[in-house]
Amino acid sequence: MRNDQHVILYIDDDQDYLDAVREMVESEGYVMVEAHSAEEGLRVYRQEAPDLLIVDLMMEEVDAGTSFVKEIQALGNTAPIYMLSSLGDTLTLTTDTVAIGLAGVLQKPLDPAALLGVLRAQLKPAAR
């Protein structure tokens, strides 16, 4: 938390998605920090200790998101992690999301109501 606000780390190589999600989450009183790659995401994760993570599946490499999740789980991460993917239901059907440590999968294009529902369910209300 930062100043009584939950911190959300969003990792995606698409700046348009980063900007859109920032607008959604910050309008609800959350703080968003961003990274453009899994490597940068690891640095930001260590600096910020986020309360929730959203990770794009396909960034600089096809499975960069999955590799990132495995790496932070090895560091002892306890924050909920959501994978963001255009594969959506296909990812859920073909991957054991619980085994790799995901709290869930969000579909691209991102539905604002779905994202905010996840945040509200996972985090205590953000300070206003």
Image: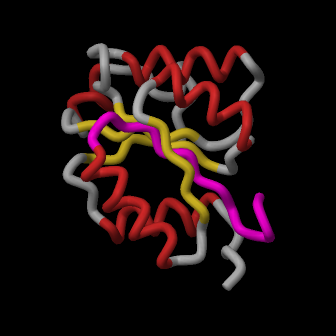
Residue 82 lies within the magenta run: no
Residue 9 lies within the magenta run: yes
Residue at screen point 48% across, 37% down: 35
Judge left or right: residue 75 versus residue 88: right
Where 59 falls versus 55 (above or below)?
A: above
From the viewer's side, name the closer residue of 105 and 10. 10
Residue at screen point 54% across, 23% down: 69
Expressed as whole percent of the image width and height from the top left, the position of residue 121 reads: 58, 64
Expressed as whole percent of the image width and height from the top left, the position of residue 124 reads: 71, 69
Quarter of the image for the N terminus: give it. bottom right
Where 54 falls versus 38 (above or below)?
A: below
Name the image colouring.
Answer: secondary structure
Extent of the magenta region: 1-14
Residue at screen point 55% across, 57% down: 32
Q: Quadrant of residue 128?
A: bottom right
Magenta portion: prevailing SS class:
loop
